[in-house]
Amino acid sequence: MALLPTLETLISKTLDLKSGLQILGDLPEAVVKAIKTRFAEVLECESAVLAAVTLPRFKLRWLRTQERKDNAKASLLAECRKSAQDEHQLSTNAPTRNLSTNSAIEDELFSFEDEEDSSLLWKAKLLTI
């Protein structure tokens, strides 16, 4: 399970409890403040958002505001473009390998005893023609 959607949901549900409490009404806010303090790095991490929105289980559903959804979409699109561009650069800058093989080496590698005998027979037949 992704941490960021879990934290966001926990914060939201904890704050929703506040309206039903008569005693300790400030407790949900204290819990949320502690969560935000403890997980500040994760809650502000752009890569955590990208990781969560790419999971089919969460997608954009866990983001509460349209602005956050739009920002996540834009960030994901930018990251995909950057990744594709980096991959393209790597493939164009990579040294090209010669994929052709030396047929003599290949023939030697795939030389079998039966073929040698039959190839000698064919050579002999060709010489007699």
Image (cartoon, rainbow, N blue to C red):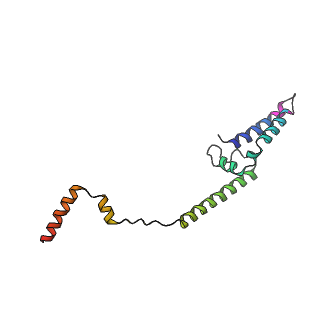
Magenta: main secondary structure equals loop
Which residue is outermost to the left? 128
Say left or right for 102 vs 94.
Answer: left
In the picture, the quarter occupied by the C terminus is bottom left
Q: Which of the two residues, 122 or 24, is positioned nearer the viewer here?
A: 122
Say left or right for 99 vs 92.
Answer: left
Counting the numbered discs, the total is 0
To which quarter of the image does residue 121 belong?
bottom left
To which quarter of the image does residue 113 belong?
bottom left
| Boundaries of the magenta span | 17-26
Task: Judge whether residue 18 is colored magenta.
Answer: yes
To which quarter of the image does residue 9 belong?
top right
In the picture, the quarter occupied by the N terminus is top right
**Vertical position of residue 68 compared to residue 86: above or below:** above
In this orientation, does residue 117 appear? yes
Measured as percent of width and height from the top left, residue 67 is found at 76, 53
Say left or right for 106 vs 122.
Answer: right
Measured as percent of width and height from the top left, residue 104 is found at 31, 65
**Vertical position of residue 45 compared to residue 101: above or below:** above
Measured as percent of width and height from the top left, residue 16 is found at 80, 36
In this orientation, does residue 64 appear? no
Residue shown at 60%/62% (left/top)? 86
Residue shown at 46%/65% (left/top)? 97
Say left or right for 89 vs 119.
Answer: right
Residue shown at 73%/40% (left/top)? 7
Q: Which of the two residues, 42 or 116, is positioned nearer the viewer here?
A: 116
Task: Judge whether residue 129 is colored magenta.
Answer: no
Residue shown at 64%/61% (left/top)? 82
